[in-house]
Image: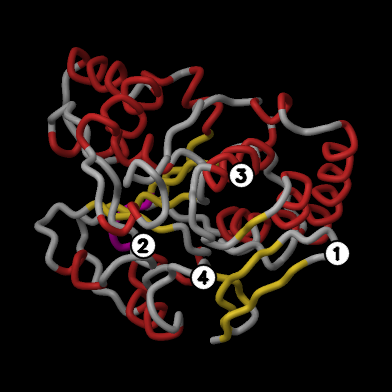
Amino acid sequence: MELVTIVDEDNNKYAFKRYEGYSFTLDFVGNVRDQLDKIAHRQIKQDDVLVYTFPKSGTHWLYNTVMMLRSGSVSYHGTPIMMEFQDFNLIEEMPSPRTFGSHLLFRFLPDQMKSGKGKVITITRHPKDIVVSMYHMLQQLNKFVGYEGTFEGFVKYFLSEEYFFGSWFSWIKDLEEWKSPNCLCLSYSDFRKNTFENVVKIAKFLDVDLDEVFLRSVTQNIQFEKLKDSHKETTPPNDHWKEVCDEGRLPIYRKGQSGDWKNMFTVAQNEHFDQIYAKKIAKLGLKNDFWYD
């Protein structure tokens, strides 16, 4: 593993961990290799559920939906334990049924889960909305965590193979090639438009037998503003995030909209993004374009 710091021609600065040609965020646990090895060989239980997302694609939204359905409680359930960012024993010590998360490429997920053990639920979002959401979150942090610079520089960084969460294109490619009955794939924009229908779909996938009244209650309690308020009310500041942001809690909720990129991208930035997008999609042979509506 190597630590990489790059300052481009426009003085935008980005840093990440590089391991075997792949990029990982600075807060990825340890030297990357050891954590990836632990994840690959993790013992998966049949009732484990993985909330599997690319960052800023609705991780907390999906996680709280799953937790409400699995627990039978509409209270706010906070933030998932992420396999790559937290102590490995935290998941090992969780009581069953366990629900945890990951942003990793599919190729780095637990071997048993890739073979069909446990269940995986993922949600995909328009990549331009991901760019806007991540950039705004970084702007709220008072500590360098991997990128420092302009929005235009961040757009270019996101499109590169050195993006600190790994290439979005590779993430989608892995997901598209993974055809497994233990994986449910949702669309962010469809979840917003048809929330109740998606709650029902998730409940069926999880084999959760709940009445319509409760499912509609879940639908109400996962509305964006409700989750945003609950995050502020129930998530206490902690020492780690006090070093990173003023409130001491990760600023994970902003607008929760689809199409907000249109308020941020210039014409030139949009054209550049579309050109690179088309080339990468063609090169990877991607066919499924439902995340790009």
| Image disc number at residue 9 | 1
For disc 4, the marked residue is: 107
| Mark with earlier residue (1, 3) | 1
| Image disc number at residue 135 | 3
Q: Secondary structure at mark 2?
A: loop
Distance (Cα) linking label 3 and label 2: 35 Å
| Mark with earlier residue (2, 4) | 4
Q: Is residue 119 magenta?
A: yes
Left or right position of 241 against 91: right
Q: Secondary structure at mark 3?
A: helix
Residue 110 visible in the current orientation: yes
Residue 207 visible in the current orientation: no
The residue sitting at 31% across, 59% down in the picture is 240
| Mark with earlier residue (3, 2) | 2
Distance (Cα) linking label 1 and label 3: 19 Å
Distance (Cα) linking label 3 and label 4: 26 Å
The residue sitting at 27% across, 21% down in the picture is 221
| Image disc number at residue 179 | none
Q: Secondary structure at mark 1?
A: loop
The answer to whether mark 3 and mark 4 are in CB contact below 8 A is no
Residue 256 in the image: state x and y as whole percent. Answer: 50, 28
Mark 3 vs mark 4: give the one in front: 3
The one of 156 and 276 positioned closer to us in this rendering: 156
Residue type at numbered disc 2: Gly
Within the image, what quadrant is residue 47 found in?
bottom left
For disc 2, the marked residue is: 116
Q: Which residues are magenta?
A: 115-120
| Mark with earlier residue (3, 4) | 4
Distance (Cα) linking label 4 and label 1: 33 Å
Above/below status of 210 relative to 33: above
Mark 1 vs mark 3: give the one in front: 1
Question: Callout 3: 10 Å neighbours few (<14), some, many (20+)?
Answer: many
